[in-house]
Amino acid sequence: MNELGKMSDPQGVPRVTFIEIDEDAAGQRIDNFLLRLCKGVPKSHIYRVLRSGEVRVNKGRIDATYRLAVGDSVRVPPLRLPSVDERAHAPVPVGAPLPILFEDAHLLAIDKPAGTAVHGGSGVSHGVIEQLRHQRPEARFLELVHRLDRDTSGVLLLAKKRSALVAMHAQLREGQTDKRYLACVAGDWSEPKRVVTAPLHKFLTPEGERRVAVRDDGQRAHTIFRLRERFAGYALVEAELKTGRTHQIRVHLAHLGRPIVGDDKYGDFALNKALARQGAQPGLNRMFLHAARLGFTHPASGEAMHLEAALPLACERFLGQLREVARTPTPAPAPTPTH
C-alpha cells in the first residue's frame, strides 16, 4: 500500500496519490482509513472531501460508509498535513545497506532484518520502503508487494513497476504464492504435521495497538505447520501460509499453546524476559520468526521463482545452544551409601 510520504512531491507540494489496498486495510470503512492515514488533518476536512467526490475508489464516487476490499485503488486528493509534513521532510536515516536477494527491472527482494519496520507510521519515523526510496532517488516506482511484522526477518518482496505490483497482488489473492516461515516455539511438539484453520479477528486495544485473536466470526485463516527439529522444551517448526492474515502464524501458534519464542504480543512474557537476560543460556533477544522462503511466478517472464533467506545469526546461535543442551550428558546419580 502506498504510504503517506508519497502524498507530496520533492518540493513538499501536496498532490493526488493512489493507494492500493492490501489485506491489512481491507474491511475498513473509507472514512476510518483516511482518518488514520491523514493524521493531523481535521476530521471535518476528511468528510468534506468524501462528500465532494474528491476521494474515489476504483475511479468511482463512494460515501463515507464504503468498506475497502483487497485490490481497491483509492484516489486521495491533495491534503495539507501540517503535523506530518515536518516529519516527512526530516532526513531518513540511510542505515546499513539492506541485503539484496534478487533484483531485476520488475522486482526487488531483500532480506529484511528483525527490528526494522517495513514502512513508517504508528510511532516509527521510517522503515524499509522509506530507506530504499532514500537510497534510490532515481527510482520512479517502488512499492511493497507484501508486509512482514517489524520483528520478523527474512524475504521481503517489492515491485519496481506498477504492472508487477498488480500481478503480484493477484497471485497473493489467489493463493498462487508459496510462503514458508521458520519459528521456534516454546513447549513440546511431537506431531510431524499440524493444520490450523482457526478464524482470526482484528481489533484495537484501548491503547490503540493492533491485536488479533481467534474468534468464530473472524476471517478465514489457514496455516500448515511441519516439525523440523525437537529440543527439550522447544521445537523448530516450518509454517506454510495458505492465507495471509495479520499476525497469522503468531496467533495460530499461541492458540495451540506453543507461542513463538520472543513474541512480545502473544508469547510467554516471563520466558522471553529470562531468555533476553545478559548471559542467558540459551539466550535470545528477538522474536524467532523468519520468512525463509517465497515462491511465486515472475510477473513478466512467467518463470517459477524461489527466493530464500538464511536464518539470522542470533537464531542459529539459539538453536545451537538448544542442541548443545541436548548433547550434554545428564550426570549419573550418586550411589546410595551402604552400611
Image: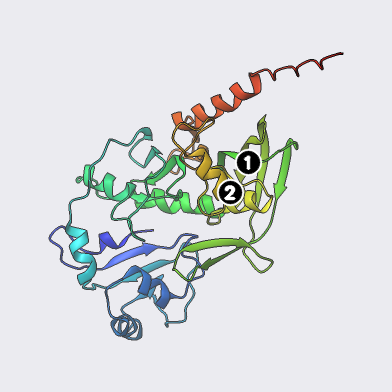
The reply to whether residue 20 is visible in this rendering is: yes
Q: Which residue has dot 1 on it? A: 186
Task: State the image coordinates of residue 76 (x, y, percent, origin top left).
Answer: 31, 71
Q: Is residue 322 above or below residue 270?
A: above
Question: Which corner quadrant holds the N terminus?
Answer: bottom left
> Total number of numbered labels?
2
Task: State the image coordinates of residue 130 (x, y, percent, origin top left).
Answer: 28, 50
Nearest to the observer: residue 117 or residue 179: 117
Q: Are the two marked residues, 2 and 1, in contact with CB atoms closer than 8 angstroms?
A: yes
Q: Quadrant of residue 239?
A: top right
For mark 1, does the 10 Å Cα neighbourhood hold few (<14), some (14 to 19), or many (20 or more) residues? many
**Residue plotted at (56% across, 42% down):** 261
| Label 2 or label 1, whichever comes before in sequence order | 1
Task: State the image coordinates of residue 302 (x, y, percent, origin top left).
Answer: 48, 39
**Residue plotted at (28% across, 80% down):** 42
Q: Is residue 153 above or below residue 229?
A: below
**Residue plotted at (46% across, 31% down):** 279
Q: Which residue has dot 2 on it? A: 268
Of the residues shown, which amino acid type is indicated by label 2?
Asp
Q: Is residue 205 above or below residue 231?
A: below
For mark 2, does the 10 Å Cα neighbourhood hold few (<14), some (14 to 19), or many (20 or more) residues? some
Q: Secondary structure at mark 2?
A: loop
